[in-house]
Amino acid sequence: MSSEELTHSETPLNGLPLDTEGRPISPSRLRRAMRLNIAVGMGGMAWYAVCAPQAILLVFFKNHVGASDVQLGLLAALATLAAPFNLLSIFIYGNLRTRKTFWAAAAAIHRLFAFVLAWAAIYMGRGGEHDLASKIILGTAAASWILVTTGSSAWWSWLADLVPENIRATFFGRRSAIIGLVNMVWVFAVTASLDALGFLNIFYVYAAIFIVAGLAGVADILVHCLIPEPARHPDEPKVGWQEFTAPLRNRNFIGFSLAIGLWGFATEVFSPFIWPHVTASPVTEQGVGAPQTWMGICTVISQLAGIATVTAWGVVMDRFGRKPAVLLGCLWVVMRITYLLMTPGNYMFLLPIMALGIGVLSPGYNTGVSQLMLTLTPQRNRTAYVAWHSATVGILAAGGPLAGGFVKQALEGWTGSVAGFSVSGFHVVGVASLALCALAYLTLTRIREGQEKPFGFMAARLFTPGILRTFMSLGTISFAPSSERAARALRSLDGSSSHLALADAILRLDDPDPAVREEAARALGRIGSADAAGALIERLKDPNSTIRPEIARALGQIADPRAVAPLIECLSSPSEELQEACTQALGRIGGHESVQRLRSLLDERRAERVIVTGAEAVSLHGVIEAAWEILPHMHRTSNPVLRRQLAIAMGNLLGRPGEFYQYLTGEQAREGALLGRLFRAARRTLGQLRRTAAEADLHADAVEVLTDDLSRVRGLIEGQSYRAAVEGLYRVTRRFVQTVVGREGPDDVLMDYAFGWDFKLGLGMWFVTEVKQRMGQVGDPELLHANALLALYFLSAYRLPTGQPGA
């Protein structure tokens, strides 16, 4: 991360934020703090993996301590049932100078719960009573979670103030990836130990695990105190009733909290019972019978998948918004269907699939929710917002495991059959959870982040073949060790999948190396996002910019109407290259203003290449009047490249824009096949005359004659007798026009009839008449060839308009 990225947007003094002791938080100090936060977070993860109500603790509590389903649901709900105590933090931190001290004390005491679990394991190992152990675990867990909940909003508020918002999601994504790697190793080691040391007293193995986790968890809190805390916001109000209730008056924020709480309720209805069911005996407890090591295996798979994608999720959030990432990440819950289909015979196949899917998708939800919450909270009263969010979500989510526990216990011992598949209370709870998740998802879609891209916009750019290449290029574009590597990475960006790199490419528009600046402009054009138009227009207007032609072409590819006026203004530049680029861009953008300016350009004294480019641009928009300028320029220029360009522009008007290009370019070996295609299409054009109801016999005879003439023209073109071929095509076209309009007369009269009947037909008649007259002055074989091909192309492309007498 660059120093500029790490600097806060709000800089009270000396351009740098201050900590609570009045010391500036410099970019280097901030970088060290972020690294320390990741390092100490590993200890916290070791604690949470075994002491929070997740798979390991829930299996211990249910399958070894002997808790009931209701007690299991209660343990899983305790962390969220304590959520209302978040509201106390609003008053506590509103009267404290620093958030760090109280949080550290509360969190350190909370982490001591690990040693209570170790005592309970030793007590059970010595033959203690199941009921007593269950009650002690539940009681101390409740006290522990109430205490830490009172301080948890301070941690989020503290970190949100410390880490700049423009890199916050990326930082937390990287943090999750690194900590997840340690968690993967730790959980696998724990679960493997539980199976491998089964010959020992299993309770003593659990006790050792809890003690190690407790030591790591307490150390995490102590070292956390070394991380600086930004000074309180100067405008932060004293806590009163207005400040306490401010989040409740923010409808969008409350809607977000309710939606996340409903999602938590829906998922937690099922969560506590999954691993106890998977590891329970299939004979006595209707379980699946998987060894506990599978908890570690699934953790390894999901963590590896999460590590591989979590940083990418952070980038996606910073580029597209948090809400679209949350909506996509929510789809992890679909993988829970595998639990409902799991049996003792297939769990070893379904569990890895489930773990992989959850590992890839869940970071989008888990990281995205916290980042979206911070985005929706104003810094001025952030602690109150975080507290209300945590309380709302917790209260709603706490009902999930409690409801699931009551339902599952009520169905204890019940079994049924659906389509030949055995079901139990576990499956009923799972199906209910998925149905509730569908309802919760609909509520999440109604949240407004403010700057997010639509979900479909994000999905269309992520699920493309080039997305992996874009992710691989991102780091190089942002932190390239050399200009050559930066330019090479920018050249790899192409299409909508590269939208992720949009911000990075925009920054490179001001790179010291001109080659990098040029490649950045070209890359933005290929990406084609209107979000880059503003930055490009700003640099197009800068007369000192050295990449204005590249900027103009990029704006043409983006085709944003906002660029029309600046591009027209740049047509007055003395640079022919810039004029040409602006002409191309205006042709791509189109619109009345662009086309009118390009038409007037053809009558001005300009460089030949600028006029040619303008002619081609106008032709793409079907402005037939441009033909009166294009054809003379085509016969006048001595530049073969410009001549071909003008011939293509003429073809755009005579037929379909862009189609004639293939007939004038490419390998000579393909010319015969392309020529055959043109003649076949021309015969179909002549065949349209047979559909005329009146004078059918006359038209049939005319078609026969014209087809024979056309066959002779083909021999002339293949023999490179282009003058004679043009004469033949003139006669065929004239006879065709006579037959269509039902009139005869000299060329100028027939041309008037043709224009009156159909403007495109008149243009074709005008073209063959004009080139026939010019052929005597043409000596260049390439120009003769182009004229013959264009005359033939008109006959191949023309279609009688529907509703006309000859149609």
Image (spheres, grey):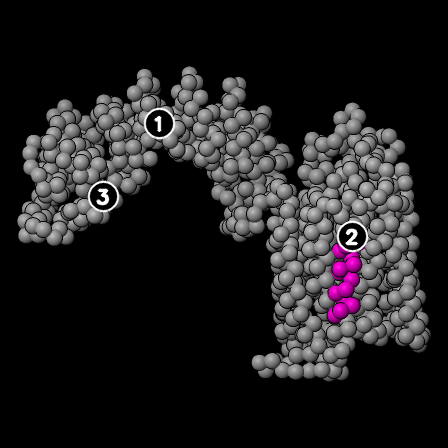
Please name the predominant secondary structure of the magenta segment in the image. Answer: helix
Left or right, residue 501 beside residue 623: right
Label 1 sits on what residue type? Gln
Residue 401 belongs to the span the image colors magenta: yes
Q: Nearer the viewer, residue 655 or 487?
A: 655
The reply to whether residue 86 is in sight is: yes
Relative to 70, does residue 33 appear above or below in the rendering? above
| Residue at image coords 84%, 73% | 67
Q: Dots 1 and 2: beta carbons under 8 Å?
A: no
Query: Which residues, given as a range, are shown in magenta?
Result: 390-404
Label 3 sits on what residue type? Ala
Relative to 30, does residue 190 appear above or below in the rendering? below
**Residue 294 at what x, y percent from top left?**
72, 68
Specify the label residue 390 is tagged with: 2
- How far apart are the alpha carbons under marks 3 and 1? 27 Å
Q: Dots 3 and 2: beta carbons under 8 Å?
A: no
Number of residues whose C-alpha sits closer than 10 Å to that of mark 1, classed few (under 14), some (14–19) or many (20 or more):
few
Which badge, 3 or 1, comes first in the chain's sequence?
1
**Residue 547 at what x, y percent from top left?**
50, 25
The mark lying in front, picked from 3 and 2, is: 2
| Residue at image coords 28%, 24% | 639
Specify the label residue 797 is tagged with: 3
Q: Quadrant of residue 399?
A: bottom right
**Residue 582 at what x, y percent from top left?**
42, 26
Q: Nearer the viewer, residue 745 or 52?
A: 745
- How far apart are the alpha carbons under marks 3 and 2? 67 Å
Q: Quadrant of residue 242?
A: top right
The reply to whether residue 665 is in sight is: no
Q: Name the residue under label 1.
A: 596
| Residue at image coords 14%, 52% | 691
